[in-house]
Image (spheres, rainbow, N blue to C red):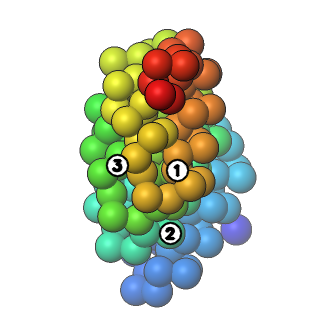
Amino acid sequence: LSAADLAKLLTDRNCDVRSAAVAQLGHMGAAASPLANDLAKMSLTDPDPNVRATAVCALQRIGKPLSAADLAKLLTDRNCDVRSAAVAQLGHMGAAASPLANDLAKMSLTDPDPNVRATAVCALQRIGKPLSAADLA
């Protein structure tokens, strides 16, 4: 399917259809960049957490990642997959995400989901703000 065909599926009533369309757009890379604004909106507002998490990752793959400010909004999402996707994308941002290092450090120690905690540790490493021994004490 073309990006235009997939765009029509982004508003499908079924969350699995929306998620599959978003994932496929991510696989298309830069060819899907005209739909980045739609994907950004979905990452923040879609009622389905799988669609939100998939949109975060798809934006990275097409070269139009969410801003650190938008990713910060997702750090408190109720769904662990959305939080994990946001944390991973902050890690990909490198030093540009360093203003959120304290939030990531807190998540690495206190998030209820072990995958989110592990992803936060890796993200801190990637942005150049690894946890210290004092953080772990």
Residue at (71% x, 52% y) in the render: 27
Q: Which amino acid does label 2 sit on?
A: Asn
Viewer-nearest residue: 61 or 103: 103
Q: In which quarter of the image is residue 68?
A: top left
Instruction: Tell me where residue 115 appears, x and y as whole percent.
Output: 59, 54
Give me the C-alpha separation between circle 2 and circle 1: 15 Å
Residue at 70%, 68% in the rendered image: 1
Report whether 121 appears left or right of 11. Answer: right
- In x, y percent, where is residue 38? 39, 54
Say above or below: 21 vs 53.
below
Q: Nearer the viewer, mark 3 or mark 1?
A: 1
Query: Residue 9 in the image: x percent, y percent?
Result: 50, 74
- Closer to the eye: label 2 or 1: 1
Q: Are marks 2 and 3 in contact (CB under 8 Å)?
A: no
Q: From the viewer's side, name the closer residue of 72 and 5.
A: 72
The mark tally for this picture is 3
Nearest to the observer: residue 134 or residue 97: 134
Q: Do the residues labelled 3 and 1 touch (CB within 8 Å)?
A: no
| Residue 41 seen in the current view | no
Q: Name the residue under label 1.
A: 116
Identify the residue at horizontal 34%, vertical 18% (top origin). 99
Residue sticking out furthest to the bottom: 14
Query: From what the image shows, is residue 119 above or below residue 51?
Result: above
**Amino acid type for the residue under numbered disc 3:** Leu
Q: Is any part of residue 115 visible from this angle?
A: yes
Binning the other alpha carbons within 10 Å of mark 2 as few (below 14), some (14 to 19) or many (20 upward) gives some
Where residue 41 appears, as percent x and y from the top left, is 33, 53
| Three-letter amino acid code of the residue under disc 1 | Val
Left or right relative to 90: residue 20: right
Residue 74, which numbered label?
3
Cα–Cα span, label 2 and label 3: 13 Å
